[in-house]
Amino acid sequence: MWTWILFGIIVAALVIYFIYSFIKDKISKKRRKLKQIKLINKTEEYKKHIVLRLHFLIKHNQKLIDEFVPSIGEYKMNYIVDTARKYLIEKQKESDFKELIIDNIDAKDIFTNYTYLRDVRSTNWRNLKDVSEFINSRMFLIDEQVEKDNFELAQKEIEEFYNNEIQRT
């Protein structure tokens, strides 16, 4: 009689353990899936963030190059080139950039284009047709009305960075 009671307790304990493990696995899978979805959403938002900044950086840099006058101009060519590269390097040092762009396989395309811009002298950015097409295609996907604040913020950030660099020199 005692053996049947002991056997019943052991079987009940095993059943409870398996049910607990099953429920625990389901909950952890759900958490992992939610975490992955949040990471994907955060990555997509950060990609937009980077594309907007690259777009306005290229525009601002090209404007300065177009306005450049040798010897008598407001800026030296070295300043224009160095400031653009410095911005890209500083942006690349951000923890979000490292986590969401460099370490993320899904962001390989944006990182590749980013490194082209970083490594090529900004006076030659016009010649990087692949990068230009990539950024323009990504800009086409961003709704300007919905992202109006981000557009303004990106443009302001680039202009402030250039202005701060002017004051340092």
Image (cartoon, helix red, strand yellow):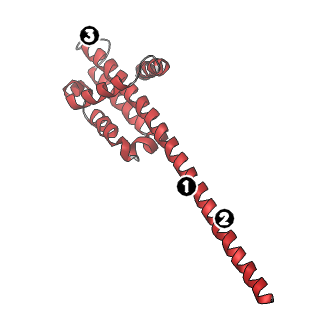
Mark 3, Cα crowd under 10 Å, few <14 / some 14-19 / many 20+, is few
Image coords of residue 147 (percent x, y)? 46, 21
Q: Name the residue carrying label 1.
A: 29
* Pointers 2 and 1 in contact (C-beta within 8 Å): no
* Pointers 3 and 2 in contact (C-beta within 8 Å): no
CA distance separating discs 2 and 1: 14 Å
Q: Element under label 3?
A: loop
**Amino acid marked by disc 1:** Lys
**Amino acid marked by disc 3:** Ile
Q: Is residue 114 above or below residue 69?
A: below
CA distance separating discs 3 and 2: 77 Å
Q: Where residue 20 is drawn, which disc sits there?
A: 2
CA distance separating discs 1 and 3: 65 Å
**Amino acid marked by disc 2:** Tyr
Q: Name the residue carrying label 3.
A: 72
Residue 69 visible in the displayed image: yes
Pick whichever, 26 or 88, lies toward us.
Answer: 26
Residue 94 visible in the displayed image: no
Image coords of residue 104 (percent x, y)? 40, 46
Tell which circle, 3 or 2, labels the residue nearer the N-terminal end. Answer: 2
Image coords of residue 128 (percent x, y)? 21, 29
Task: Name the mark nearer the viewer: 2 or 1.
Answer: 2
Tell which circle, 1 or 3, labels the residue nearer the N-terminal end. Answer: 1
Image coords of residue 45 (percent x, y)? 46, 33
Q: Residue at position x 36%, y 21% from top?
A: 56
Q: Residue at position x 19%, y 27% from top?
A: 127
Res 65 quadrant in image: top left
Res 168 quadrant in image: top left
Q: Quadrant of the N terminus?
A: bottom right
Q: Element under label 2?
A: helix
